[in-house]
Image (tube, rainbow, N blue to C red):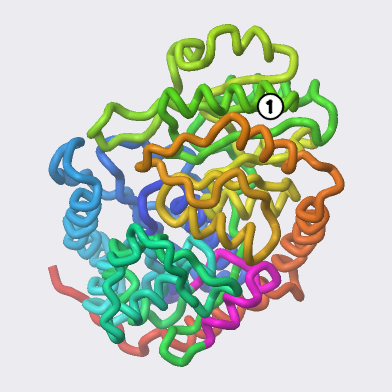
Amino acid sequence: MEQTELVFIPFPIIGHLTSALEIAKLITQRDPRFSITIIIMKFPFESIDGMDTDSDSIRFVTLPPVEVGSSTTPSGFFLSEFRKAHIPIVRDAIHELTRSNSVRLAGFVIDMFCTHMIDVADEFGVPSYLFFTSSAAFLGFLLHLQFLHDYEGLDINEFKDSDAELEVPSFANSVPGKRRAETLLYHTRRFREVKGILVNTFIELESHAVRSLSDSTIPEVYPVGPILNTRMGSGGCQQDASAIMSWLDDQPPSSVVFLCFGSRGTFGADQIKEIAYGLEHSGHRFLWSLRQPPPKGKMDFPSDYESIEEVLPEGFLHRTARIGKVIGWAPQAAVLSHSAVGGFVSHCGWNSLLESVWYGVPVATWPIYAEQQINAFQMVKDLGLAIEIKIDYNKDSDYVVSAHEIENGLRNLMNIDSEVRQKRKEMQKISRRVMIDGGSSHFSLGHFIEDMVANIPCKQQRRDT
């Protein structure tokens, strides 16, 4: 019997990989005709743990490592060369997959940062689909900027240090122009070449943004989220996780502020001290995930401190021992699901924001890099689902958020009668409903599968060895 195969090519960081695996599971559960191969590229400086599945319909193909520059190569150049170097390797892997006449290739589902692979799909004569792991509003922002740049002659760099605002169709409010995205222009142009765009969101959360993407010049958008892995805390130590959860078990309901800044979130010494003083002065119970940055100029991910006392104010751990716990890596989803957690200070990565919605935990925004500033803006200004510590913080600036600002933000976050808290509870209920039969995302995924089946080419192009 002929097997219908879909190839996923995710970007090799854990948030993108786990989202790709979760949507692959949903597709194979909905339609048993499909099997899915997930192509795993690996950075030389990161190990990828936790990528497994008990599904017989999903398999992983881990590609051999490629040599690209060194750990001190500028990150933009490194990432571009890293992706390009994988094109022939991916081509060979797909060729191996399709050598059997019993495999019918349905298409490629390509990460938003892997659009070079559209060319490989074209070589095999199959359609490409995009998996956009951020918000519909950010997708609209990128497409709008790309249109202004390519067709209206807008110089995006002129907004770098400007207070100018942009009217962006996917946002209800004017967006500060300094939220730059010029490095993504290449990928955004290629978004328009795919047959459809899967977005990790749901209509009820981003109704304005989703409606704005119905333009005829944009491929069809399928809001299929929230796509979350709620069963594991990827990449950490089980012993550490057990100690963290045991500590939470001893705290009163909704009493703990959880501070966690993503897989790449770190701070300098001055900012760490201000966070510590803000926590101490607020009087709230806290669980703080504090990570050590990689050596300056080296491409790597944060690690846990060997001696965390050295970066904290003298006596801080002793003074806060009864109400707080400072940790390294955190099992984020497990922590957010715990009844003791009443607030989440977040870097505003999209996966983290969706997890906070899923578990009904109010967020205080503290974006650090990438699209996080625009996610924070949307959550605070457009959706009213978060409170602000900072919206426009950037890790590359010299600005230090003061202990006073942090203390005020924590007090607002933990206000049990806040409108944000009530909105969160309502959106939590909706986020659960959309994924089951009759829900908007369940319907949208079914629509995507139907369209994908209709787009499968009748005649497959095969490459000879």
Q: 321 or 166, which lies in front? A: 166
Q: Quadrant of residue 85?
A: bottom left
Q: Is residue 84 left or right of residue 326?
A: left
Measuring from the top left, give residue 227's x and y in whole percent. Answer: 59, 59
Q: 308 or 96, which lies in front? A: 308
Counting the numbered discs, the total is: 1
For the point 34% across and 51% down, which residue is it?
40
Which residue, as the protein is rendered here, is positioned at the far bottom?
216
For the point 20% across and 49% down, which residue is it?
78
Q: Is residue 35 left or right of residue 152?
A: right
For the point 15% across and 73% down, which residue is it?
464
Measuring from the top left, give residue 388's x and y in whole percent. Answer: 63, 48
Query: In what quadrant of the picture does the N terminus appear?
Result: bottom left
Q: Quadrant of residue 145?
A: bottom left
Q: 256 or 355, which lies in front? A: 256
Secondary structure found at label 1: strand
Span colored in magenta: 198-214
Q: Is residue 405 left or right of residue 43?
A: right
The answer to whether one can see residue 8 in this image is no
Magenta span has 363? no
* Residue type indicated by callout 1: Phe
Q: Which residue is mark 1?
A: 286
